[in-house]
Image (cartoon, helix red, strand yellow):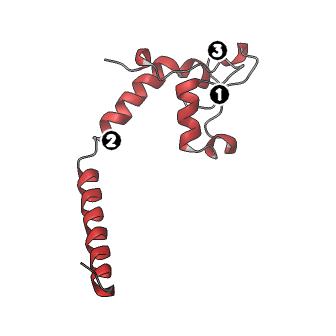
């Protein structure tokens, strides 16, 4: 069976519409962002505040004792980091620094 040019374009349109439908369907089933923010706040309070500070400026109570200063999340260098880089830092830590991996099972409340 041979498909002419109009048939090929029709298939592309159907495929594109199908992909769009499934994408919208998945987005509508996404997790509640409020729950994610609440969980993130709990994890930050337990594991991050002591070095990065309440406002994320790298001025927590333990920051003064560290040879490598904790990141200031408001600084340009922090804001330029990609989501992938940030996730890698959380997952694996930063070698030769006090920033340890913090995405293990112990970091997640519950």
Image quadrant in which the C terminus is located: top left
Give the vertical position of 97 relative to 40 (above or below): above
Quick check: 63 left or right of 85? right
The residue pinned by badge 1 equals 58
The label shown at residue 62 is: 3
Residue at point 72%, 24% (across, down): 69
Label 1: element kind = loop
Q: Nearer the viewer, residue 1 or 96?
A: 1
Task: Give the alpha-carbon distance from disc 2 to disc 1, as whole Å.
Answer: 26 Å
Work out whether mark 2 precedes mark 1 in sequence or the reverse, and give the earlier one. Answer: 2
Could you say where residue 27 lies in the image, as x and y percent from the top left? Answer: 29, 52
The residue pinned by badge 2 equals 33
Label 2: element kind = helix
Q: Nearer the viewer, residue 42 or 19?
A: 19
Residue at point 65%, 25% (across, down): 94
The mark closer to the camera, 2 or 3, is 2
């Amino acid at each position: 069976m041979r498909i002419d040019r109009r048939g090929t374009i029709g298939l592309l349109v159907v495929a594109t519409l199908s992909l769009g439908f499934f994408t919208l369907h998945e987005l509508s089933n996404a997790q509640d962002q409020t729950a994610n923010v609440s969980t993130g706040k709990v994890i930050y309070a337990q594991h991050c505040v002591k070095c990065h500070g309440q406002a994320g400026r790298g001025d927590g109570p333990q920051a003064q004792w560290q040879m490598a200063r904790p990141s200031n999340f408001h600084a340009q260098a922090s804001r330029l980091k990609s989501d992938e880089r940030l996730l890698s830092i959380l997952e694996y830590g930063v070698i030769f620094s006090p920033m340890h991996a913090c995405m293990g099972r112990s970091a997640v409340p519950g």
